[in-house]
Image (spheres, helix red, strand yellow):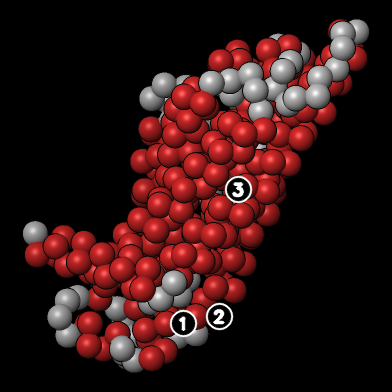
Amino acid sequence: MSSLRDILLVGRFEVLRAVRTWRAMALFLLYGIAYGGASYLAVMILHALENQVAKQLMVATTTKPGALLDKLVESEMFAEIVVAATGNEALVEMVKDVPPLAIFGMWLGLLLIPFFAASSAAECIAIDMQSRALRFEALRTGRLEILLGRFVGQLALTGVATFLALGVVWSVGTLFMVGHTPFSLGLWLLTLTSRAWWFSIPFAGLGVAASAITTSPAWARVMAIGATGASWIALGFARYFEGGDYGILADVMLQLLPQGWMRMLWEPGLGWLPAALVMVALGLAMAGVGHARFASRDL
């Protein structure tokens, strides 16, 4: 119990330090600006798609995004977009009841949050190793507790930033679109955005691992972002060779890569929870790699 208490105390310190040094504010602004700009662009794209459907149906086009939303979600074009974005054909019928902007919010989160989470977590340990301040913290608790506490703190910051970004998407959808109620949009954003947060766990662990390996916050960030980008490239190779001569290797890669579980995160009901548990396991494994080096470092 004392170890758990220490982990939570270190996590609390990590959050409070981020707030005190304005790093948290910068992180929240980054999420808000990225989500706000992308959401407005998504609204404009949806409007263009609606007008395209209107021309196919030979009805009047609309000047307000969302006015023909019901026609859009029933079109084959929208179904193809959903399959391309989620990789799950079984979702085509389900998403007809989901506001398109909520689908976009989760899809955007799956793309952006890994990089944001890895980058933010990459300096959580390295910055204190560089200043040697970590020596005083290590006198009061174990190194595993320090590493896991920083990991928990980074997940908390990512969670707050993600749900603040959810509010930005909701505001854009409420102000610039019609065709859905604010309550429905908010509920679906809350439901789907939480899944994007679970997807961030392995990448936050990756950032913590990078931070534990080097004393340079800049190098740690380069390593974390580079490894995150490399994981997407590895996903492309795994999908390309899936079912081919290297199918077994591709299957193993898909099990080890967080992106290999993305399709399950789109499952309706509670079908996405196994993927969430895998994200926790992968995140702890990533952090464990960093601890293997951190445990023997000269602080």
Residue that badge 2 annotates: 219
- Looking at numbered disc 2 in the image, what kind of residue is underneath it? Trp
The residue closer to the viewer here, 26 or 141, is 26
Q: Which mark is residue 67?
A: none
Q: Residue at position x 82%, y 28% from top?
A: 48
Q: Do the residues under discs 2 and 1 have CB atoms within 8 angstroms?
A: yes
Mark 1 / mark 3, whichever is N-terminal: 3
Residue that badge 1 annotates: 214
Q: Residue at position x 38%, y 25% from top?
A: 270
Q: Which mark is residue 35?
A: 3
How far is disc 3 from disc 2 in space, using C-alphas? Answer: 27 Å
Provide residue 287's location: percent of width, then percent of height.
38, 64
Above or below 267: residue 59: above
How far is disc 2 from disc 1 in space, using C-alphas? Answer: 7 Å
Asked where in the image residue 177 lies, by quadrant, the reply is top right
- Looking at numbered disc 1 in the image, what kind of residue is underneath it? Thr
